[in-house]
Image: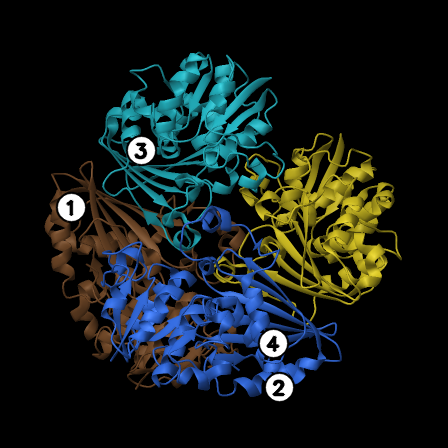
Chain colours: A yellow, B blue, C brown, D cyan
Amino acid sequence: MITAHVVGASGYAAAELIRLIDRHPSVALGVLESRSQPGIPVADVFPWLPHVHVELEERGTALARVRSDDVVFLAGGHELAREQAPALLAKGARVIDLSDAFRLEVNAGEAVYGFPERYRAQIAGARLIANPGCYVTAALLALVPLEPLADRIAQVVIDAKSGITGAGRTPAVTSMFAEVDGDVRAYGLAGHRHGAEIVQESRAAGINAPIVFSPHVVPLKSGLLADVYLIPRSPLSRGDVLALYERFYAANPFVTVFRNLRAPHLPALVGTNDAHLAVAERDGVVHVLSAIDNLGKGAAGQAIQNMNLVLGLPEEQGFDARTTVG
Amino acid sequence: MITAHVVGASGYAAAELIRLIDRHPSVALGVLESRSQPGIPVADVFPWLPHVHVELEERGTALARVRSDDVVFLAGGHELAREQAPALLAKGARVIDLSDAFRLEVNAGEAVYGFPERYRAQIAGARLIANPGCYVTAALLALVPLEPLADRIAQVVIDAKSGITGAGRTPAVTSMFAEVDGDVRAYGLAGHRHGAEIVQESRAAGINAPIVFSPHVVPLKSGLLADVYLIPRSPLSRGDVLALYERFYAANPFVTVFRNLRAPHLPALVGTNDAHLAVAERDGVVHVLSAIDNLGKGAAGQAIQNMNLVLGLPEEQGFDARTTVG
Amino acid sequence: MITAHVVGASGYAAAELIRLIDRHPSVALGVLESRSQPGIPVADVFPWLPHVHVELEERGTALARVRSDDVVFLAGGHELAREQAPALLAKGARVIDLSDAFRLEVNAGEAVYGFPERYRAQIAGARLIANPGCYVTAALLALVPLEPLADRIAQVVIDAKSGITGAGRTPAVTSMFAEVDGDVRAYGLAGHRHGAEIVQESRAAGINAPIVFSPHVVPLKSGLLADVYLIPRSPLSRGDVLALYERFYAANPFVTVFRNLRAPHLPALVGTNDAHLAVAERDGVVHVLSAIDNLGKGAAGQAIQNMNLVLGLPEEQGFDARTTVG
Amino acid sequence: MITAHVVGASGYAAAELIRLIDRHPSVALGVLESRSQPGIPVADVFPWLPHVHVELEERGTALARVRSDDVVFLAGGHELAREQAPALLAKGARVIDLSDAFRLEVNAGEAVYGFPERYRAQIAGARLIANPGCYVTAALLALVPLEPLADRIAQVVIDAKSGITGAGRTPAVTSMFAEVDGDVRAYGLAGHRHGAEIVQESRAAGINAPIVFSPHVVPLKSGLLADVYLIPRSPLSRGDVLALYERFYAANPFVTVFRNLRAPHLPALVGTNDAHLAVAERDGVVHVLSAIDNLGKGAAGQAIQNMNLVLGLPEEQGFDARTTVG
């Protein structure tokens, strides 16, 4: 059994990591470290995990106890990640960071960008993984396979809708029930840091069209839908895009491409590491719908998938078995 | 006092019409006709209107009782509208139809398209008004003022999010709480009849760029946000668009244009006939956010606004007074 | 015009006060004072009030500017109330406190308990009103009229369900969307301060049976339902209770007693100062359902009703006209 | 592998049965029969089960194909159950009925009441199981262990709050999103058939105090909380009740009794067959909080638990492993 520690263990993505590690057959829960709530059992911090009795521990505990080849998930923001990652790596740990601390410099530095559908081979040997965020993952799932068609795309518009857990568990007026309920809240109107990351990784995948990205909070806990509109420079069809997706995702266990014309259903994804892709075409524009659980494939699920790759375990281990959707 | 009848009085838009007529100082509730629930008091059919004790009446009652110069709202679908409108008009009634029965042929026939911000003068003398739907209204509010910039727009993408009351009150699995809660549901992937109406009215307003329209149901009762992306052919700025909106809407009491960069808040619009427009610009694309209450400016509110114009009443009569937002 | 100030103007009840004062025909908005957000316009603090452009002001401004006979609403908690009320009263202001600072000592001190259905006469001449909380109001509406039957009641069980705005707008994990959505949360299992207030005021109204009180948060913004079970000592019928309610509330404009056997509908009450009472009887127990808007009759609405009484204005002024429910 | 068929496979409980059978290691999905949607794949009927590609089949198919010792779940209402159960039993099938067709006569007839925590031994050898409903299960979990204290209880008040999936998937205005959202709806004011069942089974367990039962719909999909108030005839303490619960449930894998004073959290139960019991005491009344997933322990989960007992399998098989809560 490998030991997996979680540093910054008081948010929603951390809770989902703890749930997934707890049920993983090859990995055991190590130190769960939280600056804000040391000494409190997980079941009291996250009442939806009533069967996890481990107590959260003080800042610094993971670093003190980590052994070579342990896995450490950093789930506490980019400052924490920049502070702790070097020392953890120095002790021989494999580090998977869920913040954006290492995402915008992955090609320059030691970190590998943790998007397995593109970087599976590099992830397998990595010591430091920059796990992508939820919006970026949904966008890349739709864009990365399109490299062969890149010249035909004049503009990409991404209109994304996310559940509120994507905003974290730090109390804020904007995350309160009475503010989220009954509204669809557009934000990032002046630009959003995830937009830059989408552009960086799309460029790396050969998609050079300009990309406009628009995130929204919708009144649901978890789930993310990105509507990706491909404005063509020269004719582009649903069939073209569907064929590329089917080829690209054929060997990817978590990504399902809908062959018939139906929309993703977010509750089907919640609690999974799955992604559902649908493709439509109207008025000359190809409309891709990319759906994930923002805490699953958009955060903790993908982090566990990356861990499996790093450890040489079967990529699907620890997740419920699923079969492809027709 | 003018008498206003409602035919097809068992849906959400009809309930909002009844609420608005009941509080209108110049208009009194006449016959409320419902094929499905005759004999039942409004307060029992719509428990959120506990103070309206009028009973619904049988199909045909409005036609039998209507007098010349009464107003009749048709809120029961396009078949009902096609069936009843001619006879009602023949009796001298003014007819405001909330279905799409007369929308796609308004220029050819007798009906006037009930979008006051463009057709105010024609509405004033009309006998038959084709009241636009919620998606179309939100889209037109963003597009119609742009005629002077039309040549600079290469493509329009409209990604709209609506509360479930837009789907009506006829029971269906897709409108049930347990299906809507927790999901963002894209639909109309193969095309949506409101898309054709948006195109027709945009063309009439001189907007000739191709338009792709994508509706979604989000888990809220009422409220509609349309994100309208203007992909430029030649440079287009936030300032250009904002200036046109401010000029176009200067004399329109219900439309507020946000000068500073903030997003609409749907709960501010629920129960009103107001519309809020915000304009952003990112990566060369102008992003307009057009927000209304789908039952207000998107249905019953606009119908009352049209009635006020038809009757020569102040356009804002019967609505709560509002002042502009800075 | 009377001037009304609001001190502690950053919570949900304060927002509702501002909305109600803004539309009141005899009262004008004075100082809106907020320690946490001075200098910010109301429309930015509360996006559902986009038409209120007044800026919040610094702590102490109301006290500095208040004139004799102004009304001051204290909406900032009991410490603020104890601190500011004496000085405001000394300057001749009428003070309506929404906290529980003066509620548990009202009979001893200068404050009058602001439950108009029982203390209307005393409120009319008062300078300091202790405005009851939401749970207490719903409970008292069901219990106070029962004095003539008090000997027949062996035990009262109150199981109450409230929208989350009752918990205030100070950010807390327990008020976040992702915690409230999908749950019904019982709290106060070891006792709740509102329970003591219910007992105090029930005793004052002659109800001496033991009372157990159990509050719950349900996933809705606003609205409160109290199920009040009367366990009889000697036979008690629905008819007995209904008769007392009809007599007691005959001259009360905001309280409607349902004669037929149907349950209250919370959305009918939101935004109003109304209360709906229904009475059922099963298995020898009389079951009263008392429903209000927790921010309306349970907070700001009742405060405005008290202000109207204090100022000698018609009790219903400033609220939408309503007619009784049959 | 045992084959399990589901007749009446178009509702929420049926969907949960299908999900649980699909992942059960000892049981395979047989015929899924639906009068309303034959020929449609499960994944299209229930979009949250995208990986189940089996098609629903026509009425009568299960009866035609069933073999001796197969298990048949009847999830289509009491008429269907009365019609099909005899013929299925005659063919040697084990029948588990989720309707109330056989619940109110279980002691007289052949059916065993499927509440394993009380009737485990009888269930083990049964051919026909009457699976209790959600409200009844939550109530019995709180009441059945109290037999030794029965003489001390003067009155029981049960105030229950359920998610809307408890009302089934047949479209109805009362189950629509726009009616459920924002409300807490009391119903059954004149009596509810589940009340009679609670009384019957409580009497069978020696609880003779009068019981008043009050169900409510709250705006959530799944989850049920029953607040059970025990009004004492002679002193009754939290400790007395807690001690009985701990003894009674010691050997029951799915029931957790909270030793410390905290309330159940419904999201912790959704998708499980677990039940959480908390005990409080205030003002002389013992207040028990009994929480389940209405589709889990309240329907499909309990049905699978019963199936495991009938088949001699480990009681927890097919459910996620859980450990007790402290």
A102 vs C48: above or below: above
Q: Amino acid at mark 3?
A: His
In space, the residues marked 1 and 2 are separated at their CA atoms by 65 Å
Q: Amino acid at mark 4?
A: Arg
Q: Earlier in the sequence, mark 4 or mark 2?
A: 4
Residue at the disc numbered 1? C238
Residue at the disc numbered 3? D194
Q: Which mark is residue B243?
A: 2
Q: Residue at x 43, y 82 (%)?
A: B123
In this rendered view, identify the residue nearer to me: B279 or C66. Answer: B279
Residues under numbered marks 4 and 2 in contact, where contact means CB atoms less than 8 Å apart: no
Q: Is residue C8 visible?
A: yes
Looking at the image, is mark 4 or mark 3 nearer the viewer? 4
Looking at the image, is mark 1 or mark 2 nearer the viewer? 2
In space, the residues marked 4 and 3 are separated at their CA atoms by 60 Å
Residue at the disc numbered 4? B203
In space, the residues marked 1 and 4 are separated at their CA atoms by 64 Å
A296 vs B304: above or below: above
